[in-house]
Image: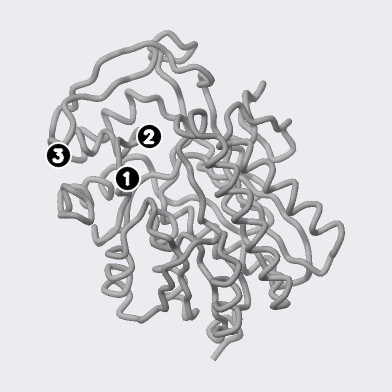
Amino acid sequence: MSIQQKQTILVTGGCGYIGSHMCVELLSAGYDVVVLDNLSNSSAASIEAVQRITQKPLTFVQGDIRDANCLQAIFTNHDIQAVLHFAGLKAVGESTELPVKYYDNNMNGTLRLVEAMTTASCKTLVFSSSATVYGLPDKMPITEDADTGATNPYGRTKLMVEEVLKDLYTADPTWRISLLRYFNPVGAHATGEIGEDPNDIPNNLMPFIAQVAVGRRDKLSVYGDDYPTPDGTGVRDYIHVVDLVRGHMKALEFLQDEPKLAIHNLGTGNGYSVLEAVQAFERACGITIPYQITGRRPGDVAVSYADPTKAKEELGWEAQYNLDRMCEDAWRWQSQYPNGFNT
């Protein structure tokens, strides 16, 4: 049995969209998995689905990442070697309306987690950051050394956590920390058993399109068609969620060698417009997606896509799935579970 097969990994937010796909990859690779999730924007049904897919058990703890006693119990009861930290509130619009809620959850949650890890002498952490830390970038594609400066409270919490972890590493260079800046995760597991299941109106494009296709929403609102892009709609770098979590696997391996703090973009390096994404989804589901052009949203940039070169060179990782595959997998999940895990 290899070293990694003996390791126990804590996945915070492991019932969520990305966290549940992460659990599938970890269990399939032979890791033991402990999930911590407060189910505020997720369902325990995802954990059951993960275990069906992998035919392997995991340990689920329902609790809040801000609960120091809960964290202490997890590190006392399990020999955790590394933490993959996904727990956090993530809706940009909501963050502007409820900034204190976002700072409390995302910032304080991470601080409590790092304190518990320090006490337990567990110093390997992969953090779920975001391309929102780049704010309004002035050139494309976006490299890791681009200027940072988030334009909303959600993005600022990600940027602040990055700064905390950088300071932590400077103070104690025995830590092994990976900051992964995601672009736009979409798609679902190929089985269609787990996927993106927002509790409320979707904040992101792909689940909204999927809900229109399945009849839960009347039409898609397209925010702006007057951007300086080929069809006037915003261009984004969409990445398949399975590619994304495989990037975390590579980051975890990368941290095994020696203590370090590393920053990597996880994106495809390709930009697709909103209308291109709609057309790809129509090809996947065979249904016309009605949409309505509305005004731009404040803070939205015209174009955003990654330069993933550093992740390829240092982690040996690159995205494998194209937009059509992302849409096919998203549709398989949505059509099998039209009301998500409540189906």
Left or right: where 57 falls relative to 341: right
- Looking at the image, is mark 3 or mark 2 earlier in the sequence? 2
In the rendered structure, which disc, 1 or 2, sits on the residue that comes first in sequence? Answer: 1
Give me the residue at 60% from left, 42% from top: 103
Label ID, residue 214: 3
| Quarter holding residue 201 | top left
Q: Amino acid at mark 3?
A: Val
Mark 1 residue element: loop
Q: Position of residue 333 (x, y in %)?
A: 23, 52
What amino acid does circle 2 point to? Asn
Other residues around mark 2 within 10 Å, as few (<14) / some (14–19) / many (≥20): some
Per the image, the residue denoted by label 2 is: 203
* Number of numbered tags placed on the structure image: 3
Under circle 3, the secondary element is: loop
Give, as a three-letter code, the residue at label 1: Pro
Label 1: how many Cα within 10 Å (few below 14, some 14–19, many 20+)? some
> In front of the other: label 1 or label 3?
1
